Amino acid sequence: MFVDVAKIWIKAGKGGDGAVAFHREKYVNAGGPDGGDGGKGGNIVFQADRNLNTLMDFRYKRKYVAENGKNGGTNKCTGAGAPDLIIKVPFGTLIKDAETGLLMKDLSDDKPYIAAHGGRGGWGNQHFASSTRQIPRFSKPGQPGEEYHIQLELKLIADVGLVGYPNVGKSTFLSVVSSARPKIANYHFTTMTPNLGVVDHYGNGYVIADIPGIIEGAAEGAGLGTAFLRHVERCRMLLHIVDVAGSEGRNPIDDFETINQELKSYSPVLASLPQIVVANKCDAVYDEKIKEQFVAHVEKQGYPVFCISAATREGLEPLLAHTGELLETLPKTKIFESEYVKPVEIDVKDKGFTVEKENGVYVVSAEWLFKILETIHFDDYESLNFFQRVLQSNGIIKKLEEMGIQEGDPVRIDDFEFDYVR
Ligand SMILES: Nc1nc2c(ncn2[C@@H]2O[C@H](COP(=O)(O)OP(=O)(O)OP(=O)(O)O)[C@@H](O)[C@H]2O)c(=O)[nH]1
Ligand SMILES: [Mg+2]
């Protein structure tokens, strides 16, 4: 079964809690705090996989929860971090925040994407000792993991999209220009799910997507509707296939206009893609005049048009060559830009802060800074440097100096206390 949309819930692991412990050793009195930090919770990671082509698995399993980090131990032992939970999806899967509908990531390459970050482990009491607080009897709990309701949406990756009425020969065309073997039959909606085929044109391969036929009113749900058009949305161009033999008594000009109208109401961007018009079933034309009128009609609108017969394979070569040449001039397959900004990043925009002096300690208050603080690893030089830069660039250091801070004076931010070093 082909499934191209799914809703799931993902939750990254919680960070392990920090430990409260004190150094114990024979003959050593009142050892310092040595409670280790909690380990990081597992992330939820999406990874595109070439062996997958449907989101069907997500119909059956809808909850994805990564493991929690382990708690910190004595002796400055950091708890073990939890492994990432990796979710495999087909190439071309869009990951959206289901609540806002905003795109988090278009998974169109091999790079893994962390959709939900595991919580950071809490600090053990080893970090909370300072000149004014030598016996910290507390540690920090691990941070919760991020969680999201996610909408997955597959948009196949192809260069060329085949569009047209049902039964005009789209699948037949795909079967004669590529090694794909879609179902072909003389009735409407033979094709119920998209098929991909690769055209090997003088070593310059391109991918064609064959989708179900479209009929008048498709935008309102007639026939199979227009939902399948999502699979040609990132195509670079369209081949618009029209039955010019009038095998079903319809007029090819009307068919052509109807389809273009349906494309437009689905997406103006899709409708404005370069189109090559393919007049198919030329072997079975009973009224040359209808065909000629059709060709004149589309040419007048500026479309290139090729008369072919997918059944007898006539006229394919010039069409494939022209398609290959046109593709060389077109931009690459569309990768959709992320629109989603994590709420924390929004909060951080407000960079106000206050500094007060309480019993000789410089106390810095700033909600946004607490959030950054939670992400800092104080054992890590890079991380610490980053934190220094944050304090510097937001004027906090300047403010402390204005207040007369001296080397070695204690500074407290949230629960974290450290000695000021120039
Ligand atoms: N005479 C003739 N018949 C053709 C040609 N191309 C396709 N057909 C026939 O037209 C019918 C429909 O072909 P399909 O390839 O299944 O058409 P489709 O556009 O994929 O149809 P849907 O999947 O239902 O939208 C089949 O009976 C084909 O054999 C052609 O060039 N000439
Ligand atoms: Mg078909």
Image (spheres, rainbow, N blue to C red):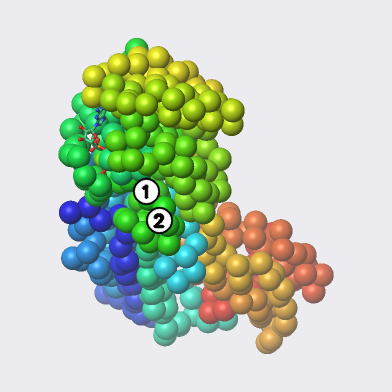
Whole-number angstrom distance, CA of label 2 to CA of label 1: 6 Å
| Circle 1 SS class | loop
Query: Considering only vertical position in the picture, is 422 above or below 382?
Result: below
Please, what is the three-letter code of the amino acid marked with disc 1?
Answer: Ile
Relative image position of residue 373 (x, y in whole percent): 54, 68
- Screen quadrant of the N terminus: bottom left
Relative to 379, say whether 212 is above or below.
Answer: above
- Estimate how packed mark 1 is, as few (under 14), some (14 to 19) or many (20 or more) residues with alpha carbons within 10 Å: many
Mark 1 highlights which residue? Answer: 214
Mark 2: secondary structure: helix
Residue 85 or 268: which is nearer the viewer? 268
Residue 306 pos. (x, y %): 43, 22
Q: Which residue is mark 2?
A: 218
Q: Residue at point 47% right, 37% down?
A: 253
User: Residue at left 36%, top 80%?
Assistant: 20
356 horizontally vs 186: left or right:
right
Residue 273 seen in this snapshot: yes
Amino acid found under the numbered disc labelled 2: Ala
Viewer-proximal residue among 190 and 420: 190
Image coordinates of residue 14 in percent, x first then y, are 34, 72
- Corner quadrant of residue 366: bottom right
